[in-house]
Each structure stands twice: as C-alpha cells, then as structure tokens.
Amino acid sequence: MIQFIFIGIRMDEEKFQQRIDNGEKIEPKDWMPDEYRQQLIRMMSQHAHSEIVGMLPEANWITRAPSLRRKMGLLAKVQDEGGHGMYIYCATETLGIDRAELIDQLLTGKAKYSNIFNYPTISWADIGVIGWIVDGAAIVNQTVLAKGSYGPYARAMLRICKEENFHKKQGYEIVTALALGTPEQKEMAQDAINRWWWPALMMFGPSDKNSPHSAKLLKWQIKRKSNDELRQRFVDITVPQAQAIGLTLPDEKLKYDQETDHWEFGEIDWNEFKQVISGFGPCNHDRLAARNKAHSEGHWVREAVQAYANKRGGKDVR
Amino acid sequence: MSDKKDSQFDLWEVFLQAKSGEAHQHAGSVHAADSQTALMNARDVYSRRGEAVSIWVVPANKIVASSPEQEGPFFDSGNDKVYRHPQFYKVPRGVKNL
Amino acid sequence: MSEQLELNKARYILRVADTELILGHRLSELCGHGPILEEDIAVANLALDCLGHANFLLELAGRFYSPALSADNLAYERLANQYFNVLLAELPNEDFAHLILKQLYLSIFLQLRYFSWASSSWKELAQISKKALTEVKYHVMHSKEWVLRLGDGTEESNQRMQQAIVNFEPYVADLFVDHAEDCIFKKQFNCALSSELISDWSKQVEDCLSSAKLSFSEPNSNYSYSSITGKHTEYLDYILADMQFLTRRYPGLSW
C-alpha cells in the first residue's frame, strides 16, 4: 500500500516538474510538492517582511526631507513599499498560511528579512543611495522573479516592478542633485555610497555553491538565475551610473574587463554579512523593536475594529 | 508567540474596473473586518495611480472556483468545434457587414 | 495700500496652506508605524493629499510677495511666528484615537472652508479649492468611518476617543476665529468668515460623535488663544526644527 502511494507521489512530482519545464504557471489549487510549498512560503514571506521592515530606514527621513517635492516623493515611495509587502503577504496566503501567523513569525524573530535594512540611514544622501542602489538591486532580482513558476508570486512581482521604476529614478535624482551640488553635498553623497555599496552587493546572497536552497529553487524555477549572475548584472548596470555623476565606488579592485564586457569587483566580506544576519548588525534590534511597538500599540485598534464588525453580525457593514 | 493574539481580519479579493465600459479585473487582496473598510482599503492600496473608476470587493471565502481536475471536461476546449469560429464559414467577397 | 492688500491675501491663504502642511507632516509621522498595514497606506494617502493642497496654496500665496516666493521658500524658511496654521494641526499623534479625531475635526473644517472658496469670486482660490474638495470629501468619509469604529468598538477604544476629545477641547475654538483678512475677503470675494463655519461644523461633528457613542460639546470660546496672529503651541518649533533641519543647516541649496 505504501509502495503504491510512493509511486503515486513520484508520478505527481514528475508531472509537476514537466509543467515547470514547459513554462506553465503553478496556481494555488494545483498539486505541488510539500517542499515547493514550504520553500515558497519561506521565500515569499521573507520578501514581504523585507518590504515592511524596509519602510523604516526611509521613513526615518520623511519629516526631514528638504523640499516639498522630496517630502511627497519619499512618502509615496515608502507607502509603495508598504503596498508591496501587502501584495506579497496576500500571495503567500494563497499557500495556506494566515497573515497573522506570518507577522508573528517576523515579530518573534523566527522569520528573516533582507539584511540590508539592518543598516541605519544617517544622512539625507542615504535616502538617494537607497533608492538608487538598494531598489536598483531589488529590481534586478524582481524582474527575474516575475518569470517564476508560482502564479500569484509572479503576478505580484509584475505589479511591483511597474511601481519600482519610479523608486530607482527618484533615488538617482536625489544623489545626482547632491553629487552635482556643493562640495559638502557631494561629500554627503560619496560618504553614503561608501557605506551602502558592499551591503547592497550582499543583497544577492552568498555565491550559490554556498547557498543551501539554490539548487532546488532553480530546478523549480522559483529562482531563475543564480545569485552571482544577478549580482554581476547589478554591478554592470550601476558602475556607469556612478561614473556619470562623478562618484567613486569603494572598491579598489573594480575594473572593466573588455573581453567579458563585465565589471570585475573585489571580495565581499561575508563575515560582515554573517554577523549582521545573525542579529548583531547596527539596527537589527531597533528594527524589530519598532515593528513590535507598532504592533502592540495597535492592538487596541485592531480589537476595536473587530468588535465593531462583530456587533453588526459580520461583513455587511455600510 | 507575541503576547497579544489578534487577527489581521478576513481576506477580501479586489477587482478593478480601469475605464468605464471595461470588465472588472482581479487586482489582488486586502484584509478588512467589514465591507466598507474593505472598499476603502482597496481604494487606498490599489488605485493610488488612478487605476480604477470602479472597485468590487468580495470576501475571499465566497469565491467559488473550478478545480484543476475539472480543467479538461469543464472547459470544453473548442479546438475541435471549429463551427463556433467565424473563419469556418466561407461567404462571397465584397458582401458588407458580415 | 495695494502691497498691504497683497500681503493680506498671502496671510489669508496661509492660514489654510500652513494647516495642510503641518497636518500632512504630522500624518506622515505614522508611516511605517501604523496599527494595521492597510491603514498605514491609507494615512500616507491622506498625508500626501494634505501636502499636495499645501503645495498649491503656498505657491499661490508666494505670488503676493515682492519678490515672489516659492512654496519651498515659504515652507522651509519661515519661523514659527510667521506660520498661521490652526493650533490643532500641531498637536502630536498621541495615539491612533488622537490622529483620527484630529482628522475628523480638520477634514470637516477644511471641507467647509474649501466649499466656501470654491463658490467665491476669487478665481485662483476657487480653482484650487474645487480640486481639493474631491480629496477632502474622501478624508471626511474616512475619518467618520474610523470614528464610528473606535467610538463604538471596545470600551478601551471608546475611552481613548473620549480622552482625545478632552485633550483637543482647548484648541477647537481657534478654528473659528475671524481676523481682519476674513472680513476683507468676505467683502471682496464673498468668502465665508471662519466664524460662519461653526454651525455646520458642529452639526456634522456632533452627528458623528453621537453615532459613535461619544460626547460632543460646542467649541468653547473661553479658550481665546489663537494662532491667527502667529502665536502657537510649544509643538510647532519642534516640528519646524525637524522639517527645516537641512535647509537651516545648508541654506539656499537645491536638493
């Protein structure tokens, strides 16, 4: 009996892999291996958490944005990140897990979020640099994720990619204004890129040979390109953009290779990555504390909303 | 587990009508405890860039969907029923409004 | 004399422009810290609308200075005693109840103010007001719905709303104080006096609060401290120190 079940599952897995190889999209009600479901939940919820936590370093400068245009632009961008988190939470919920549980995993430290948001925004220039290279790195990643095998995630990525373009442009515009401004403004921009460059490269994750999940994710087309490929693409796009506005990147080994048409770059300090991702970065504690504070201070609000709806017998309240 | 258990409310699916006369299309979901809040949330989350002239929200658990196993028999593919397609029929040239 | 009239026009517009700016600034403080993800996004929309209105009105007000000033000049280079926003806008978001109650009070107030301007004979002001009205209408609806849910939710939410009502009491009468400019432009363009807005405002607020099981009391004119001449609460200086930090440190630069 068990043998028959085993054969049954093998056949399902083969059919499933064939669908993936044919470029078909897997939808919520389709059969999927349990590990596919679990990997997606892990990856998608991590992505959603990153969007939400990622609001914090940039929201830090909304009240101090130095013009009305910058203030409104930054507020709209941070609002978008919240929206992106929401789209991805909703897509994750299609895999059979509740948003309340996902949020709980974040707040209790069980779930991870992108390491880049454990760094502080200590000048206005950081806001420009984040839009330009952190969103820039995310775009490189997300454009490829939009071709992934899981329907709801791919669709969420398409929507996000459309909105993300203005984020990068806005960031680059801010950095350009500084780089072409007074010496103090230029120094502010250069200092910011010096602090954010290496953490941005780390966003793509360790080299795939050191990445435990990569092989399966590639086979199931949850990932479509390797970490190293995406990182290289990001470097190739970004170096000329820095040169165009007279900023240098903090890497002495950065060199253009005419043969490969790629920018070679130096060794990433993976010890720093490990330290930060293990919870010892500059802002890990404060990011989670801020999210926990918002959540616990909002508890009475959520209770009130539910109580009001319950008093009216459920959903039809007008 | 965080010390205060609470809900993120029910899930609602959101459909937007981009322009008058067009069909509503699925845009995504929101969480809300009641229908008025669901509508307001849908407006705030999904039509910030003027993407909609009309919004529908439906509790996610009220949506009835065909299942993947029904894909074959449920959706008569029509590929072998060419008489449903205009190209199947030959008519004299030059006759207008056909 | 005509230069004075121009400055009067600027001052008159600034009462609302500054209110929208400071209110938008306060709302934007919630971004990333809201009680529900959907509401975080919704409040950011409210803030963006307010800042947008402020931008248009500041631009208009700036034209009445000689030489003309930009919206950014006005927002980022005036000190607290040159601001004319209503006192209520400056109050901090002590909790979500305070934020929502402030929204109720100010969105209804602004709707009445814009409605009067939209039907006045001051063309540019009417144009800006008509556009603002479509957004402010949504703000009024949003705040009424939330006041209902918080007032008639749990005992705790009701108490917090009651506390906000008490805390805001000293600042409500300020909304309806008339200054010289009110009288000038009532005559010239038929813009309603601030004091003429009080009965519609009170009726709407009372209707909403009583449906939400909350108590209402008429604006108390014994609280006569008003920002109409540039006097403020202690909060405004902190708001401006934050908002203007970069432009004070590096004056006259482009960003």
Image (cartoon, coloured by chain):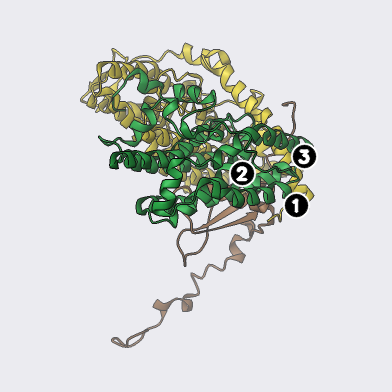
Chain colours: A yellow, B brown, C green
Which chain does tag 3 point to? C
Relative placement, left or right, of C30 versus C251 is right
The residue carrying mark 1 is A314
- Closest to the observer, C109 or C53: C109
Residue in view at x 47 percent, y 18 percent = A120
Total labels: the figure holds 3
Q: Do the residues labelled 1 and 2 touch (CB within 8 Å)?
A: no
The residue positioned farthest toward the front in the image shown: C1
Q: How crowded is mark 1: few (under 14 residues within 10 Å), some or many (20 or more)?
A: some
Of pointers 1 and 2, the one earlier in the residue sequence: 2
Q: Is mark 1 on a helix, strand or loop?
A: loop
Instruction: Tell me which amino acid carries mark 3.
Output: Thr
Q: Residue at x 70, y 46 (%)?
A: C209
Q: Is residue C139 visible?
A: no
Tags 2 and 3 both on a single chain = no
Q: Sort mark 3 into few (<14), some (14-19) or many (20+) by Cα contacts within 10 Å.
A: many
Give the quadrant of residue C167: top right
Against C242, residue C172 (above or below) is below
Which kind of residue does numbered mark 1 sit on?
Answer: Gly
Can you give x and y, in whole percent of width and height, for residue A128 in the image? 37, 27
User: Which percent across, then down, holds residue C20?
Assistant: 47, 39
Front-lying residue, C62 or C50: C62
Please, is residue B95 above or below residue A117 in the view? below
Q: Label 2 belongs to which residue?
A: A32
Circle 3 is placed at which residue position?
C154
Q: Do labels 1 and 2 share a chain?
A: yes
Point out the frontmost of discs 1 and 3: 3
Q: In this view, does B60 lie above or below A6?
A: below
What residue is drawn where x is 29% and y is 42%? C2
Q: Which of marks 2 and 3 is in front?
A: 3
